[in-house]
Image (spheres, rainbow, N blue to C red):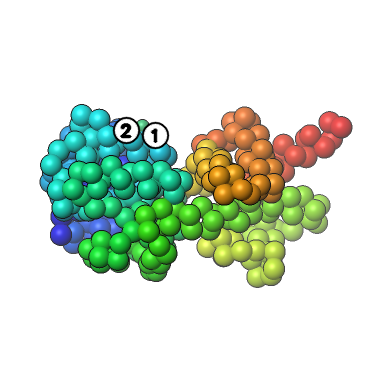
Amino acid sequence: MKIGVAGIGRMGAAIAERLLKNGHQVTVWNRTVAKAHALEPLGATVAKTPAQLAGAVDIVLSILTDADAIAATYDGPQGLLSGDVTGKLFVEMSTVRPEQQRALGTRVSAKGARMIDCPVGGTTGPAREGKLIGFVGGDAADLTRARPALEHLCRRIEHVGPIGAGASLKLAINLPLLVYWQAFGEAVALCQQLGLDTARLVDIFADSSGGPNVLKVRGAMAAEALAGKPPANVTFDINLIRKDLSTMIAEAKSLGYDLPLTARALDCYDEAARNGEGASDAVMMPVSWLKQGGKRKSDK
Ligand SMILES: NC(=O)c1ccc[n+]([C@@H]2O[C@H](COP(=O)([O-])OP(=O)(O)OC[C@H]3O[C@@H](n4cnc5c(N)ncnc54)[C@H](OP(=O)(O)O)[C@@H]3O)[C@@H](O)[C@H]2O)c1
């Protein structure tokens, strides 16, 4: 099966790499061309435009920042949907609102093509190891077509409803995770005076009710960050988290709910971004809070 990947950011690069290493023919496109060319040594073909990518493959996976990025890549004179895409399958994997996936589904189907949404849980490491969780919205027959690609990427694929359903579940799954990094920073504020080695501290949290799964998988990075060693590779940055939290709040509002914890967590992430941490990895959030929160407290 010829697979295209549109959006060679951190996640798209990891996904394309995984597919290439599992023997698929992969064509890639990215707005910043150098990131696409970096995959050529692994066997990727680089398309000059999204239209060329869609023309060259049977199935297109897209994983892009947000709804604006999706519009820029799918629509317009050189967009994924600009040529003859009759019968092609699009798998949209970005974290956006369900209504944005549904609107895209309408545009795709107007061109005689098919679409599912499949946002994913897990970051670049799980993508490279095929250990993501895919949350799928769309028709079962379209998921069946996408499975040969998705099964190389995901350890678990959950088909949870029509187009947009994957986006609903993905936003829900990310909420406790993103609020957690702030909660962890606040928790450490209560015990850092003990002077415990940060690896030991994180291990205690991870092994008790103080830690969710993310501390088991990213605990070593979190401990190093607390010890003053920021991660060399950023996998999920604070600016993307702010986008996700804002998206959750807007989505909940449309459903008639307030999300007070999420809103307050967003304030804290916004503050971290104002303090120059927007491009830092999520594991730097507790560190940023301990620095800034502590300073603010002593100012009072
Ligand atoms: N990082 C994670 O751990 C993770 C995990 C699960 C899901 N996600 C979700 O996956 C998506 C991608 O995340 P990421 O970490 O790969 O982000 P990233 O590294 O910032 O990559 C973003 C991608 O979107 C492209 N893009 C942005 N604006 C564009 C525009 N106007 N036109 C065309 N392309 C545009 C970028 O192109 P350029 O390279 O040219 O900027 C890049 O390919 C997001 O929705 C994120 O929430 C991320």
Viewer-proximal residue, 146 or 85? 85
Evaluate whether residue 129 shows in this view.
no
Mark 2 within 8 Å of ligand 1, using the beta carbon: yes
Residue 22 lies in quadrant = bottom left
Q: Which residue is mark 1?
A: 68
Residue 295 lies in quadrant = top right
Q: Are marks 2 and 1 in contact (CB under 8 Å)?
A: yes
Asked if residue 221 is positioned above or below residue 297 in the image, the reply reads: below
Mark 1 within 8 Å of ligand 1, using the beta carbon: yes
Left-right relation of 39 to 258:
left
> The disc labelled 1 sits on which kind of residue?
Asp
Where is residue 79? Give x, y as percent: 23, 35
Residue 72 lies in quadrant = top left
Left-right relation of 114 to 272:
left
Ligand 1's image quarter is: top left
Q: Residue 284, which numbered label?
A: none
Where is residue 170? Give x, y as percent: 48, 55
Around disc 1, counting alpha carbons within 10 Å, would you say few (fewer than 14), some (14 to 19), or many (20 or more)? few
Which image quarter is the C terminus in? top right
Q: Residue 72, which numbered label?
A: 2
**Residue drawn where x is 28% and y is 52% of the image:** 115
Left-right relation of 127 to 60:
right
